[in-house]
Amino acid sequence: MSAPANSSLVDRFAPSPTGQLHIGGARTALYNWLVARGSGGKMILRIEDTDRARSTKENVEQILDALEWLDIDWDEGPISQAAADGRHREVLAQLLESEHAYEFEGSTRLKVPDEGSTTVHDVIRGDVTFQHENIDDFTIARSDGSPLYNLAVAVDDLDSGVTHVVRGEDHLSNTPRQVMILNALGHEPPVYAHLPLLHGPDGKKLSKRHGAASVQELREAGYVPEAVRNYLALLGWGYDDKQTLFSTEELKELFSLDRVSKSSAVFDEQKLRWMNGTYLRELAPADLTERLEKFTGRDGLADAVELCREKIQTLADFWPLAGFFFDGPADDPKAREKFLDEEGRSRLQAAREALATTEPFDTPSIEAALREVVTRLDAKPNKVFQPIRVAISGTTISPGIFESLELLGREESLARIDSALSTS
Ligand code: GLU
């Protein structure tokens, strides 16, 4: 079932700027965005910046930067919550005036009836009922008159015409208080959807221990935004039991809150790596090259990218595999010791002689020439290929050996082999 068209839907992403955008926050942003884009409604970005000490310009920038990288846009905002302070104070006065609130030792509290209950209607969790006997009259403004969190959120949602509040499950316990404030103001609450918590594969709450924990860290680790969007979408949502790869267009079409699960979701970086690899392989070669050139800060990578595209899962995997083409062989003494011993060097010498006369110096001819050496020496193929690999790349892991030799060219290949023969 796709999301029903509802052009009057309004949702919001309301981060508190505390630094880099956490993966959980990014999922909340994505779900709000998919709900809005899938329904023809609109999404508001509200920065919950009432904690002035933490809400620095840099911290706000981090959120905008992460959203931009994920290609998540919004229709209204960024709205500053702090800027609505005057309006929040106006509502406080109104609640005091209507006797829904009272002053106590200078602070302002909302009256909660002793009996009865407040029910939160949640699309994901169903009805969640909170007994009033368990909720004390709660503070909505400090003694200096500054409005507190639950008041600000309820008033902002009301004033912005928010119809759907999609946020993390950690906010569920605040919700009956926000509903009571809205009711005291004579309004119906919006629809709520509290998203399941995120855990690491060990079942513990997601943190840096589990690898990349923020959007910025995912970018630095070489993931591409379309793969991250796909993976984040699956953290708590699924279409059926089978499909795991969804283009962003499909997500907009298929995503719906009623398919979000109640139980916590597991962020598994290994799965993201796999998914990212499939996205990289589907990119047009020129596109992948451009992204890798941006990521590594190097240019002229196209030919090397062609050789490596099947072997990398992240943009960060590329340079360790292909850097030797550009910066010379890596320095791995263990690889040299193992493959460039006396026996290895004599095979390398035989290979060198064959490569010196291989014409043309292209992959098929190189392969034929080296296989002929293998047969002549009556050796296992790797006993010939690994010494060559170590000589040209410095390591035991490289793209295909014949292709790599062709890309380096005869002159450079022979020079590296000679250097390995003379120094090992
Ligand atoms: N500012 C809260 C947060 O960053 C979200 C509040 C809300 O969505 O209502 O967790």
Image: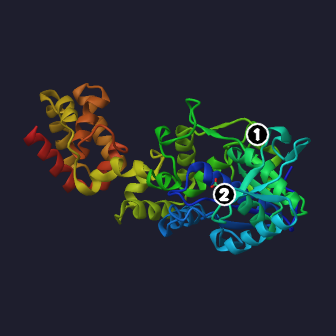
Q: Residue under label 2, please give it.
A: 29
Task: Pinpoint residue 158: horizontal percent, then vertical percent.
Answer: 81, 66
The quarter holding residue 410 reads bottom left
Q: Label 2 to label 1, Cα distance in Å?
A: 17 Å
Q: Secondary structure at mark 2?
A: helix
The reply to whether residue 256 is in sight is no
**What coloring was used for the rendering?**
rainbow
Are there few (<14), some (14-19), or many (20+) residues within 10 Å of tag 2? many
In the displayed structure, would residue 255 be above or below residue 376? Answer: below
Q: Is residue 271 left or right of residue 415?
A: right
The quarter holding residue 128 reads top right
Residue nearer the viewer, 298 or 39: 39
Type of amino acid at the residue the image marks with label 1: Ser
Q: Secondary structure at mark 1?
A: loop
Q: Residue under label 1, please give it.
A: 261
Q: Is residue 343 left or right of residue 225?
A: left
Type of amino acid at the residue the image marks with label 2: Ala
Residue name at image x 54 percent, y 48 percent: 276
